[in-house]
Each structure stands twice: as structure tokens, then as C-alpha cells.
Amino acid sequence: MEKLEDRIMAGREISGGEAILLSFLEEGVETMFGYPGGAIMPLYDALHQAEDCFRHILTRHEQGAVHAAQGYARVTGRTGICLATSGPGATNLLTGIADAYLDSTPLLCITGQVVDSLVGTDAFQETDILTISMAVTKWNTRISSAGEIPATLAKAFYIAGAGRPGPVLIDITKNVFSERIKFRYSKCNSLQTYKPIIQPDLEQVIKAADWINNAKRPLVLFGQGIILSKASEQLREFVEKAGIPAAATLLGLSGLPAGHPLFMGMLGMHGNYAPNLKTGETDLVLAIGMRFDDRVTGKVSTYLRQARIIHVDIDPTELDKNMETELEIQADAKAFLKSLIPLVRENSHDEWVESFKILGEEEFNAVIEKDIHPRSGKLTMGEVIHETAKIVGPRAIVVTDVGQHQMKAARYFPLKTSRTLVTSGGLGTMGFGLPAALGAQLGMPDRTVVAFIGDGGLQMTMQELVTIAAEKLPVKIIVLNNGFLGMVRQWQELFFERRYASTTLSGPDFVKLAEACGIKGIRIETRDNNLQELKEAIAYEGPVLIEVEVEKEENVFPMVPPGAAVTEMILSGE
Amino acid sequence: MQTKKQYLVTTLAQDRVGLLSRVAMVFSRRGINIESLQLSETAMKGIAQISMVVTTEPGTIKQVVKQIAKQVEVMQAYSNEQPEFSASLEIHRQVV
């Protein structure tokens, strides 16, 4: 790239492909994920000549590339980059883009497009990706002449990361990559039509502080907004000062350290017993950076009926969307907490906090103890996750796929620091885990990345085992194999009179599969020697796939039955 | 179930290819038909005004308007029941 920079210094023209790569350098991009093809080939040609500047990961499917970019973005906080060609390349990105849209992940997807003169003619590998992706992107646009590259990419990076982050797709016609331009880049820091509100209205904060100071049984519900705005410290300071118990959504997990005396666990359908039940008793809820998703609220008409609700979110469309609230504050979570903390009284609500602990013990005795310390039978997901957490320690990053193992990981892996959980929340994308883990490992090369994946989810994107092997990424892949699509089977058991329609699942020999892909494979079938095999397997230096044969018909409890109020949460299926 | 009403939704946005699709998408996603539509450039160059008539519930219209306003190109969106609407009528009267 030095040569390229020299040419720019000399005021000479560069190609559109080179201009894109230089724009990436201006934005600090080091890693990207992608898959070449006809329409995007000239960009890859430019990339070939800039190999020293970037690490491009060739995934084995475009869906792998986009989930990997998501994993990278989720652990680093930076915009994930992925490249794909036109037509099928572009459409293969859509699941990941939709996932990133719901889970507020900053992504920049570049898709190649047929040459400008052929657009609209049903040319080979032409698809109208802009229209197709419109509903799942924060912004998308086409570049059809090279002169538009610097300004459009600068705008794309800004939009992806500003306010509530999200995916941006830029479709670039093939002619653009070879057109020549003089390159000048300036970063975008604001837009006339898009101005996220960061600072809260002070009068509203004063009102919120007054309500908080006078509440008898206050409760904080927080979501990923805490992580995205880097507000973990402020949240901790606030709950400690005001003495308020707090609970997280699935994506909010790691926003407060597990084990903190005021952290009461996870909300929602498979969350913890205490925070769910206590939503029926609280008199004041402070909801920060969360969106009252239906998996959190259960039957919404019964949720928090007796409580006053303060809802803080950077995205105004979330305010008053699912829940009618008494005080809506549009602001960045960190900015809000910073202005709130000086206004709240030092306080404690000992009896109220204690009442959570009592329910917590009830849940421990009825569910958790059996899950993490089973005395007989086959291994359980809970005990494998619990033991893995002890082995890998608090700095590890946990990636999950979707289903029972995901809920068990969220419940039993104690997350101590921010950005240590990468999971598909809003879209619930099976197949997310393996590619997201490879992206997470690239984002955090010095941390242990452990991926819990079910045998169903793994079979959706298992081609990425090859990528992990080729890139020598030391991901610890733990396949919790129960031979079922477990979560669907659980619902069939509980709500469809055990009619197991299409949920019995055969799979390959995962150990042999791993070995065939170039990854060490280990199978664990018993808990002999206190899972010494698990310790040894995780200690392996390179990538390793650990297939664990777990109890076939294990269920995730507690559970809020579909359509029920969260206060009707059940501890067992009986 | 709230009673449905007819609303006029006004959007001011930076005009560009795909703007109308993005705005219309917010309605079609919820199965709301656009009964009448006008798009024209305003006195500000590059800024378009889109006026749409739709029939839906009061709770839905509030959400829909916010979701339109959230689109990156959109500067302002409001329904005929919001104060912005009366203000714009007032400006219109003064100009005319």
C-alpha cells in the first residue's frame, strides 16, 4: 500500500478498488470477512496488492462472513466489514444483516453489482439487493461512479456506528472498481438529517432522580445499550449508590458483573426466577438501553402494571412502543447515567434486595443445583457450561448458537466483564455461533473464545470449521449434542403433547468431521474424573471441537409459558 | 382494539433514489394501505415533502410516524394530530 500512498501524494489517480481500501485504512479497518465472485473481483484484485494492510478472511459461505463480521464487531465495538459479490453472494448475507439490525450491531457490507449499464436487465448474477435489504438495514445505497466512494463510505461508517448502531449495505457496480479518481477522504462526524440525541433532557433526569429517591421497591432493567455506550462502570456506580437491584436482558448480560450483590440475573422467558417474579412487585422500574421485547415481558398487558416506568433509550422508536411508560428519556445510556448519579441519594433497600435472594435460593434448589451438579444420568448442558466457565476463567469470551444451550449458557456462564457474550438475541439465528466465534477470536486474539453450539445449529454453518482450521484460530468449540432440536422439542413436549415432529436429528460423527476439516476432535460421554477430559481438551493450544453427549430430553427451566405473565413463571414442567 | 381513523402523515426528507420505498415500507410492513400520496420538492433544494393518507389505529400511527422519522434521510415526520402539523399550516397561511 506504500506504493499507493506515494501515488496519492504525487497527486496521481488510483482505481475505485484502491480507493475503497484506502477508505478502509482511513477508518482503521484491519480485518474483513468475505467471499469473491464475478462482480466484486476487481476489488479483490486491489486487495491482493494490499495484503500487508489487511487480513481478509475467506469464509466458506457468505453467511459465515457476515456472522463472523458480527462476532468481530460485538467483541471489539468496531464496525464489522464484510464483502460479497452480486446476486447469490449478496442474498446470502441477508440473515446476518437482519440479525445485526435487530441486535444493533455495526456492520458495513459491501456487495458487488453488475456493471452500471446492465443494472435492471436481469444480467447474470444481478439481484436488486438494495430493495431486498431495505427492511433490514439502517441505511443502504449504491455507488455507481468511483467519485462517490470516499464520501459515501465515510457516511456509511458514520451511520453504522452512530446512535443506535446497525448494518449498512453499500452496493457497488463493477465498473466503479476500475474507474480512476483522485482520492481525498474526510471522515463523517454528523449528518444534516440524522442527529442522534446523546444528552438527556435535564428536567427529565431530575424527575427520574426524584422518582428513584422516593421509590420503595425500585428495579433496574438494562439491555445492550449499557454495553454499546460503554456504561458498565456508571451502571455499577449508580446501583451501588442508590442500592437498587438490577436485572439484564439476554443481550445486556455482562453489563454488570455476575456475582455482584445487586445483580439479580437475567430477565425473560428462561431468565432467573427472582427478577421475573419481582416485576410484579416493584413500584418503580428504570429501564435503560432495552426494548421490552416480548421474550422479556411475556404477556405484555400484565407486565409491570403496578409500577411507574422510566424508559431510557437512544432510539426514540423504542419509547412507548411495546410498553406505555410514564417517563420516556431519549438519550445515550452512559450520558443519562452520568447526569443521574449526582442527583440520586445514597440509599439502600435491604429488605427488597433480600427478597430477591430468597427467590434465588428457591430457583437454585429447584433447578440450578440439578442442572449444574447432576448426580446421575448423562452429562447435562448446565454442568458442561458451569465446568467450562471454571476452566476458562473470567476473561474468556462466550459465543453461543441458538436454542436450549444458548439459554443454559446465558444462565450458567458467569460473565464478569463487558462484551464477553456474543449471541443472537432478536433474530434467534441458528447457525450464528460457529462463524461468530471465528470473528470474535479475530477481534480478540489474546482471549480464549469458547463457543457453545447445539448439534442442530452446528449443522447449519459447519463449513466454517474449515475456515477456523485454515486461519489457525484457537476457538474452543463445544458441541452439546442431544440428537434433537432441543428447544423446539421442549415446546413439543410441554405444549404439543410430545408430538416430536421433525425434531429428532441425526448428525455426522462430529469428531471425524472436525478431524476431516483439520481441527482436533474430542468426544466426551461421561463425567468420569470430574471432567478431566474437558480440562485437557480446552487446554489444547489450537482449534478444538469437543463433542459432548448430553442428556437427550433435558429442558430449560424456569420458563415463562408462551402467552403467560412473567409472574406465572414455572420452575418445572410438572 | 382501538377504532381506526384516517390520518395525513407528512414527511420531510432529503430526496434520493429509494426514499419513497423506505418510507412506504414502514406502512406496508404493518399491512397499512396508502390511500393517497403526493411527493414534491419543497422550497429547500433537495428536500422533498411526502404526504400520505392512511387509515389505522391511534396507537399505531404514533409508532409508524416515529419509524419514518428514524430513517436516515428523514428530517421530520408528523401526523395531522401532532403540533408540527398545525405549525406547518400556519407557515403555509402566512406564505400564501
Image (cartoon, grey):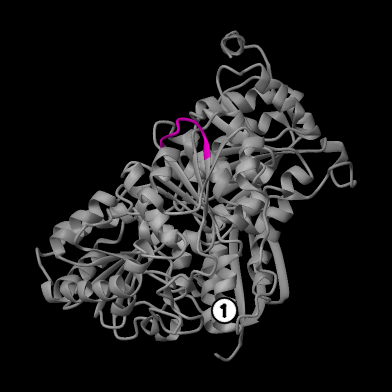
Q: Does residue B21 appear to the left or right of A343 in the view shown?
A: right
Whole-percent x and y of residue A510? Answer: 62, 47
Could you tell whether A554 is left or right of A350 in the image? right
Give the image quarter of residue A68.
Answer: top right
The structure residue drawn at horizontal position 67% and vertical position 36%, both measured from the top left corner, is A516
Q: Is residue A80 above or below residue A175?
A: below
Query: In the rendered structure, the residue with mark 1 lies on which chain?
Result: A
Q: Position of residue A199 (x, y in %)?
A: 32, 54
Q: Which residues are magenta?
A: A539-544
Callout 1: 10 Å neighbours few (<14), some, many (20+)?
some
Task: Name the magenta segment's main secondary structure.
Answer: loop
Q: Is residue A287 visible?
A: yes
Name the quarter where the N terminus of chain A is drawn. top right
Where residue A329 sits, quadrant-wise, is bottom left
Taking the spot 25% from the left edge, 56% from the top edge, the residue there is A235
Q: Is residue A286 magenta?
A: no
Q: Establish if A491 lies above or below A428.
A: below
Query: What is the secondary structure assignment of the residue under circle 1?
Result: helix
Q: Residue furthest front?
A: A528
Quadrant of the rendering where the C terminus of chain A is positioned: bottom left
Which residue occupies the foreground of this view, A241 or A385?
Answer: A385
The residue tagged 1 is A493
- Pick whichever, A58 or A214, lies toward us: A58
Q: Is residue A228 visible?
A: no
**Looking at the picture, does residue B11 appear above or below residue A131?**
below
Instruction: Please name the residue shown 75% across and 24% down the image.
Output: A179
Q: Position of residue A13 (x, y in %)?
A: 68, 15
